[in-house]
Amino acid sequence: MSEERLQILKMLEKGTIDAEEANELLDTLKERDKIFEKVDSNKKKPKFIKILVEENGEEKVNISIPILLAKTALKIMPKKAKDQMEEKNINLDSILNAIDDEGSTGKIVDINDNGDHVSISLQ
């Protein structure tokens, strides 16, 4: 039982509210829960990871990769490459976590450095 439902029943038990008010509050919670369930089930699951790299304002890389391929590539990436990314404050663990969170879409990395730009997003 949710904490909110328990609080309503305790208020009813203490006489703070009557049975009709408790029923209305419980119905309201039920409707709210239905809305949240609907929103959660409608979350767009990412299918692609998009990588955009610009140097001095000029696009150098613009690629979309299927999520499964991207996850595999990140897991088998050479240690030297991972270390270089860490030096640039790109945390592969957070990228993998964002990819694994299937409800997550949008930018997960956005770096601007003197006209150079790297953006990684889930779409």
Image: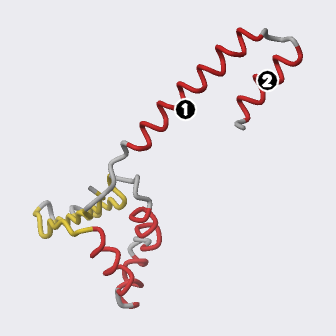
Vertically, is 116 above or below 2? below
For residue 63, side relative to residue 36 (left or right): left
Q: Quadrant of residue 107?
A: bottom left
- Is label 2 in a helix, a strand or a loop? helix
Q: Nearer the viewer, residue 2 or 97?
A: 2
For image coordinates 20% across by 64% down, the residue present is: 52
- The answer to which of 10 and 23 lies nearer the viewer is 23
Residue indicated by mark 1: 33
For the residue marked with disc 2, what is the amino acid?
Leu
Residue at image location 79% in from the left, 23% down from the top = 9
Q: Residues within 10 Å of mark 2 (few under 14, many from 20)?
A: some
Image coordinates for residue 85, horizontal then vertical, percent: 37, 78
Residue beneath the point at 26% across and 55% down: 123
Is the residue 22 above or below the residue 123 in the image? above
Q: Residues within 10 Å of mark 1 (few under 14, many from 20)?
A: few
Horizontal and vertical percent for residue 104? 39, 53
Image mark for residue 111: none
Viewer-side residue, 56 vs 101: 101
Task: Give the Cα separation between the discs numbered 1 and 2.
Answer: 18 Å
Instruction: Please tell me which residue is depicted at 79% across the width and 10% down the height of the picture.
Output: 17
Q: Quadrant of residue 8?
A: top right
Q: State the image coordinates of residue 11 (x, y, percent, origin top left).
A: 82, 18
Q: Mark 2 highlights which residue? A: 9
